[in-house]
Amino acid sequence: MEDLFTGGGWLEDMLREAARPHTSKRDILHAIEEIVAVEGDAWGKEWSYIDELIEQGDTGAAYAGAMASMTRTIGALEGKIGQDAGLEKPVYPFLVRGAEIKKLIDGGVEGEGDMLARPRDDLERLIGLERINSARRLLASWGTGILGGGSRELISKIEDDLEELGECRAFFLGDGDESLAGSERELELADRLATLATRFAQELYDLYMKNTAKPEVQNRFMLLWDSVRRLEEGGNEKTAAFEALQVLEEALVMVGLQSGELLQRVDLIYERFGDAEELRRVVNHLVNAYQDNEEAPDALQAGAYIGVIEEALRDLGLKVS
């Protein structure tokens, strides 16, 4: 069980960030409620327009709109609860991480904002789409409700499970009650942890499926998959298969599974895949081949592997073709 929390496991960073006290969290959520009472669905209207821009292919204008929405919200919150409001800290680390918030608030590297507002190529469009989604999740974490119906209830449920996972983490890393060590209670906690970690991953999946449906996510993954298709059509099937594996990993990050062994993350949402066993076989072979532990797939195998991964991406709600 300790492996879940050490060595870069998928929960470790999130739990560490969640353990940091956020003294302004309640104030932020209350302030948003007050703004909504006056302005109504202002964020919904802003983001409906941003969605339209993305669907029209105007990624630059959509990025500018997303940043304007975020800046307006920051100003409104600081006006209500002061400039030292802790807005750079994640309210819900399973929705948006501190590193993402820093990029948004600081504007990324020098000149990045202008570049993303006027993207010149697919790479800049990809970065812009990623930033748009980070802004959406940041606003959602403040209580604006722009992830859609039922998201607030799900966020509350995930928060409760994350708190319990944190308590389990404290115990298994030696910060808990040592009198329980080796007892039946320890075994019960270990079983509880395994069950809770799986449920938590599946709840994250359910939350992120709401996010996955957003146009910036769909467009981003269509661009990523286009590079796989171009490689495959150019006769580079093996390279395309490894590129497809990378897209799958990006998709797992998108559904909240940020780090850890790729096969373990697939297993956490095993039941969400139509042909999970075949996906596991493909992922296992490609990962081992990448690490030079197995022979790389031949062209025919690689083509089949791409098809399996494409189907898995559809299972994750991504319309990559």
Image (cartoon, grey):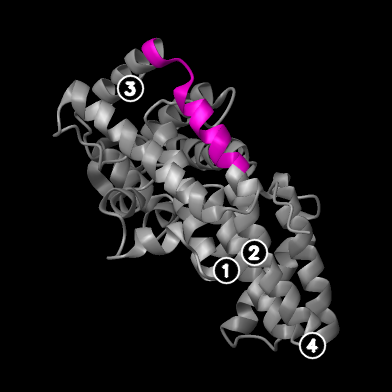
Main secondary structure of the magenta stretch:
helix
Q: Secondary structure at mark 2?
A: helix
Whether label 2 touches label 1, CB < 8 Å: yes
Nearest the viewer among 271 and 222 is: 222
Q: Secondary structure at mark 4?
A: loop
Q: Earlier in the sequence, mark 2 or mark 3?
A: 3
On residue 23, the disc is none
Q: Position of residue 220 (x, y in %)?
A: 60, 57
Q: Earlier in the sequence, mark 1 or mark 3?
A: 3
Q: Which residue is mark 3?
A: 29
Q: Residue at x 65, y 47 (%)?
A: 55
Camera-nearest label, 2 or 3: 2
Q: Could you give the CA–CA distance between mark 2 and mark 4, rounded to whole angstroms?
A: 19 Å
Q: Which residue is mark 2?
A: 223
Give the residue type that dot 2 points to: Leu
Q: Which residue is mark 4?
A: 235
Up-down relation of residue 219 to residue 238 (above or below): above
Q: Position of residue 208 (x, y in %)?
A: 57, 41
